[in-house]
Image (cartoon, rainbow, N blue to C red):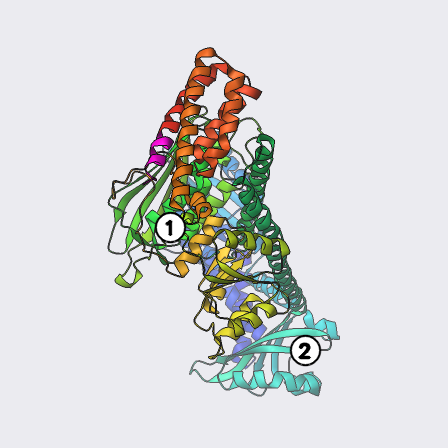
Amino acid sequence: MKKQLEKQIQQIAELINKVEEGDTNVDALIGLEELLDLLSNKIKSSKLGGLLDSQPAYLESVRHEAIFIFDRSLKVHKYTGMFDQLFHLQKEGALKVSDLLQFKDDKTFLDKIEELLKNQANQTFDATIYSSQGVPLPATISLELLGGKKGDELIVGGVNFQNTTLTDIKNYQQLVIENLPDIDVYLFDSDYRYVLAGGREKERFGLSNSYFPGKTLFEAFEDKINRRLFPFYRKALNGEMAEGEFRVEDQIYYIWVTPVPNFYNEVVGGTAIVQNVTKDKEIEIRLKKAKDDAQRADKAKSLFLANMSHEIRTPLNAIIGFAEQLSQSQMNREQDRFVQFISDSSEHLLSLVNEILILFKIGMGKVHIDRVPFNLTQLLNVIYNSFIIKANEKQLQLSIQVDPGIPETLVGDPFRLRQIITNLVANAIKYTDEGAVVLRCFLLEKDELTYHLKFEVEDTGMGISSALIPKIFDEFTQSEAQPDKKRKGAGLGLTICRKLVDLMDGHIDVESELGQGSCFSVLLPFYHPSDEEQAESESHFLLSESLLKGKKVLFADDDEYNLLLAETVLGNWEASYTLAANGEEAFNLAKTNLFDILLLDIHMPRMSGVEVVQEIKSDPKNPNLKTKVLAVTANVLQSDLKVYMQEGFDGYVLKPFKEKELYNKICNVLQLGEAPGTESMWEDPRQAKEQEGDGFDVSNLRKTANGDRTFFNKMIDTFVRNAEELRVDLEQKLDERDWNEIGERAHRAIPSFKYFELNALVKKLRRLEDLALREKSFDALPNEIREVLRMVDQAINEAKKTTT
């Protein structure tokens, strides 16, 4: 060791002499600094050994380049050597051995400690430790026991780096810089002269790092490249950072140039980092192309879906419309069943089209939540009326309960709220064969801005198994345990509910037990309306009121079946109607004739419905400048419907439409009759309104009577007489257990009750017919007959009230 120390001192003396003689070679200075550092470490090691000079084993350890003392818990008590330089240690707080020696795997180190403590024998082993920059440092590690009580032993560790010094580390770093792939690094002075160069990208052009030092920018590159690099270098020498792109042959480069200041903050040079970004640019171009392709595909899909929706909904309008007209006519039992099949299948197809469309729009991020004022009672009325007939068909009790603390008018998205609740109620009725379906609405809390509402849809149906509940909101999942073709559906309704609730910042959940029914709950925020935002309620009119009699209506559609349907419906209302087969024809008629209302299809040849409205509204002399206009469209995209309203339409009716829907819309737009206000169709604590059974609708009879009151009263008397005879017949045949005659009698009675819109009673009579003639379920008939008798008595009483 003494000879080694003398040799190092001799080397230091020689280097100092060179410096004194004016040899300022950088390598010589670096070598002097490193030898002084190494000698300093040895001296520190000796001083540390002197503190524990009673331990001969430790004194021996000063041969190491770094030493440390630690205990069983791996807590470091003292250390010296190269650790600070290698690991940039923070002196505050206690250090662990892992702060000094960073292994990829410390198992060997720990095993050696155990062996040392067990056998009291020094341990030496080779390992690789890593500097704070991740540089691998091969080393030989020695472990020696210093003594101490059992359990409190101190261990001294020594580290000798195998041919590794700070110079080696710096050389390693230089090696990394020189071999950077796709990157070049340059240092230049104030004369644009290169001081050093690194990186391997320049090799692409036959240049090396050794070529640059001593040459100026103008000497190192050809003029074409100089002209591209010079502005960046000049900015750096002016104290500015510069960056940008330039091209050399078929390669694209990005350059960062920064100034280098001296001690006095004067710019004495600059650094340039040049990176080849050709591949990145190619990827960027491909990504842009992929994005453009995706956008085109998205537009194509949207167009396809809109067209598909339009092309399916347009013929469905005729199918559903004519099925509705047929159901109001006199038919035999088989014809009545066939029409019902057509109506049910059409409604099912329409439901599927709507579900696919909304799911696609949500997936494409094209569903936006509105904030508009709406009347909650009116919305719930629509939902109730949509399902009461279906509930009656299945003999289910459908009820709605509303917290009296909820205001009539809220601000939110009524369209999406209706979609959510409609899906939940439809599912509840679908999967419930007996009992009840209840829709509840609670006010959970409110603040200055928001009402937090909870909607619950509870049923007494078949329930959901615990295994299925976690995935019940997934696509194409249905809640029943066994497939049942009678329960039609694609399994998309609950998925749509969850996605819409998420968009509305709400939460949806379900509680259910197989065989015990289900309860779906939805939490949604709504907002307080301002005085200007109080929602206006649409009135609901009876067809019997004949409010459109004599009204001049222009109906335009390029589909001949829809024109025929319009002719039938408008004729039923005794309106004075004109039909147009395309937009141009409609516009020409509107130029020369004054109408009370225009009903225009959107997609028509020659001129679209939008173009017709634009032409009419832009001509001050057009007689229909102030005439109300409704869009009758199969396009259900909310974004398009908003455009129609902005273009001058006063409202819209979606295809396929029911006769009552179109009638109500026209009456509301024309503001006909007196608005009765918004009344709930269920027992609402806010209005205490009750409604029991079917309403006795005499609109068809009034139309037929055409103002002849004597004829009207005579027909009512005939109905009452026939209903009383039916009551007597059913009671007699029940006593005789003549089930076949009961079925035949029920069938013959259906048209009479259907004429007066007694739909629930009609469904009951059909149920009697099925039980008696087809299912032969005679045990169920007595209870069914007694319910029919009760409903017949109620119909008779309602009929008698209409005569004077």
Is residue 322 in view from this perspective? yes
Residue 759 lies in what quarter of the image?
Answer: top left
Question: Where residue 133 appears, x then y in whole percent?
Answer: 52, 58
* Residue 435, above or below 687: above
* Residue 567, above or below 682: below
In front of the other: 483 or 298:
483
Question: Where residue 708 appears, x then y in whole percent?
Answer: 41, 47
Q: How many marks?
A: 2
Question: Where residue 351 appears, x then y in whole percent?
Answer: 54, 44
Judge from the rendering whether residue 565 lies leftward or rightward of residue 59; answer left or right: right
The stretch of residues the image draws in magenta is 794-804
**Amino acid bearing label 2:** Arg
- Residue marked by disc 1: 540
Mark nearer the N terminus (2 vs 1): 2
In front of the other: 723 or 326:
723
Q: Which mark is residue 79?
A: none
Judge from the rendering whether residue 668 lies leftward or rightward of residue 231; answer left or right: left
* Residue 223, above or below 325: below
